[in-house]
Image: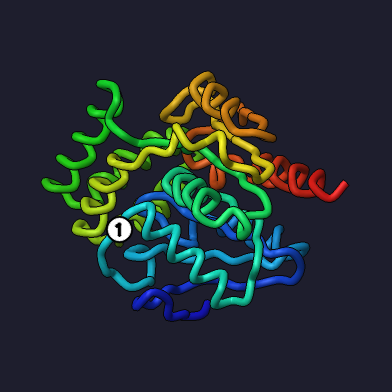
Amino acid sequence: MQSISINGIRIICVDIGKGAPLLLLHGLGGSHDDWRMQIPEFAAKYRVIVPDLRGFGASERREPFTIQRHARDMMALLSALAIESAHVVGLSMGGAVAIELALRAPQAVASLVLVNTAPGFTLTNWQRRRMAWLRVLLALVLGVGGVARVSGQGAFPARSQGRLRKRFIRRASQTSRWVYLATLRTLTRWNAESRLGVIRAPTLVIGAQHDFTTSEEKRRWCARIPHARFVEISGSHHHTELDSPERLNRVIQAFLTGLSD
């Protein structure tokens, strides 16, 4: 772990391995720990960079917590690490950051892998509004720990996933309620769907069978990105990196290997 000062704040990140840079971006309420089942495998072939985004994990808490600001932070992080271009993998909110990064700094993104995410989180239907207001209510009444308990049960429903669920809840509960609510507010105002057609990086969209949004929805917006394809991970829920790590790793590895063929 190392601490890097960028854009007036302190960002904590993992920087391990040698080879082509691979940037892994976590989701809302997450940290670099979400990628613990990917870091060792990919570090055998790539230089793996895994930050705690602004406000999350051990990184400094300072507003604004917008997708645009996170993207600018990642541009500055890559520059600070003397990395001109990286393969970028984003989970959920991290996928939004990855999309914004590809739009703002296309030269910095060698390829995109978007896992269980969307090109916009605006509250365009009742399902999204219900989910957002439920999270806000839980965070206000029970804190982020309450959100984590509900989310953990949905992400890891099987009895055999008890250890994963407990670790997820414990780690996510450490997120500041202020940071969580501020980020959720800005996230629901971000939408890049109309800009997908200008993305030029080779793109892989991965969707869990039981994610919050359907594979059909992901296929629809994936088709708007040039040089993009979609893969579904059967049986998986929102945190595919934890409930199906071997399959996710294989799919990403095959995609990255194919880029050099």
In this rendered view, identify the residue nearer to me: 89 or 232: 89
Q: Residue at x 52, y 36 (%)?
A: 196
Task: Answer whether residue 66 is visible to the viewer in this image.
Answer: yes
Name the residue nearer the viewer: 29 or 260: 260
Query: Which residue is tagged 1?
Result: 65
Q: Residue at position x 64%, y 29% from top?
A: 230
The answer to which quarter of the image holds residue 121 is top left
Q: Position of residue 147 (x, y in %)?
A: 26, 44
Q: Is residue 194 above or below residue 23?
A: above
Above or below residue 180? Residue 122 is: above
Residue 113, position as x, y percentages in the image: 61, 44
**Mark 1 residue crowding within 10 angstroms, few (<14) / some (14–19) / many (20+):** many
Q: Is residue 124 above or below residue 19?
A: above
Q: In terms of image quadrants, where is residue 22?
A: bottom right
Instruction: Give how far across and how far down residue 255 sits, in percent.
Output: 74, 43
For this orientation, the residue located farthest to the front is: 198
Identity of the amino acid at label 1? Phe
Residue 51 percent coordinates (x, y): 49, 66
